[in-house]
Image (cartoon, rainbow, N blue to C red):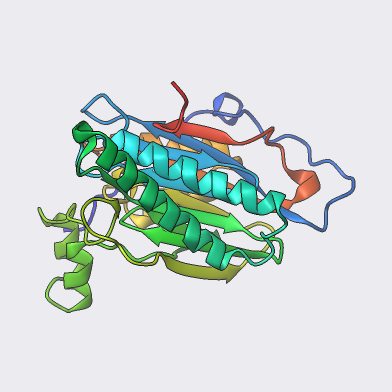
Amino acid sequence: MTAPSVPLPWFPAAQAPGGPPAPRPAGPGLDRLVLDPAAASLAGPRGEDQDAGYAGPDALVVADGVGGGNGGATAARLAVAEVTARLAAGRAAGEDALPDAGLAAALAAAGAAVRAAAAADPALRGMATTCTAAVLTRDGRVVVAHVGDSRAHLYRDGVLTRLTTDHSLVQSLVASGDLTPEEAAASPMRSILLRALGGSQDPGPADLIAVAARPGDRLLVCSDGLSGVVPAATLTRVLAAERRPAAAASRLVLAALAAGTRDDVTAAVADVTPAGWSTTAGPVLVGAAVPG
């Protein structure tokens, strides 16, 4: 069956996370697009958040530690740290104008870092993670690199489009016609991944997806603790209703709780906006990505 529609948590705009939208300033830089980002994460019943997330002015990254044990939080944290470090190094070197290959290489490096850490510590053997990264490039595109079943979405003009395809057993069965999407959503096999960073197998190159960015676009990158229980119609309603990314991210996490999620939940949300309009002070780390 499909995921049920759930009532959305509600709060007055003045009390929403991040408060009411700030006045949009004028000034230089309005011809350059940036992300106005936010993120929220909440641990599931295990008590340890094994999702990791990053939301910055040019990228959203979400990693979901696989399996609930054997260092899932460590794998997710390493993946986010490696990808964001590689992106920062590329910007510093002026190599971020056309970052498609660089972003794919960053996910490959993250996979290598996870495998190296697992090889060095028997307690971490077998750890793995998903990783989905969405980057706003200097040439005005959103480029997504993706391994696993975390998802990237684009909300534009009232329509939510999923940009990624899950690397999962049930998705492969849907693609082959052996399962319907409704059967896949209810399948006990829906958490089985065919590709992840780390583990015993090389996942191969990350999927790469690119779309032209427009001012007013809204991006959502999330773990399956959200997308696995909250239907696309509800995601769309939240992204349409909340004016600020911080309020949208928090309300999406609450919607997952209302839907009865049994997993960690992470939502990273960002608006594509002219540089002079961004109201975010700096990058946000959530979940296992938070130091300490």
| Residue 186 visible, this orientation | yes
- Residue 228 horizontal/vertical position (percent): 27, 50
| Residue 238 visible, this orientation | no
- Residue 196 horizontal/vertical position (percent): 29, 55
Residue that sits furthest to the top in the current view:
292
Query: Is residue 162 positioned above or below 270 on the image?
Result: below
Query: Where does the C terminus fall, quadrant-wise?
Result: top left
Query: Where does the N terminus fall, quadrant-wise?
Result: bottom left
Q: On the picture, is 10 further left or further right than 38?
A: left
Q: Residue at x 44, y 33 (%)?
A: 289
Q: On the picture, is 260 further left or further right than 280?
A: left
Q: On the picture, is 202 further left or further right than 104?
A: left
Residue that sits furthest to the right in the current view:
27
Viewer-side residue, 240 vs 86: 86
Residue that sits furthest to the bottom in the current view:
176
Residue that sits furthest to the front in the current view:
120
Viewer-side residue, 111 vs 210: 111
- Residue 223 horizontal/vertical position (percent): 35, 46
* Residue 17, quarter of the rendered image: top right
Q: Residue at x 54, y 45 (%)?
A: 84
Q: Residue at x 87, y 44 (%)?
A: 26
* Residue 69, quarter of the rendered image: top left
Q: Residue at x 48, y 45 (%)?
A: 82
- Residue 256 horizontal/vertical position (percent): 32, 39
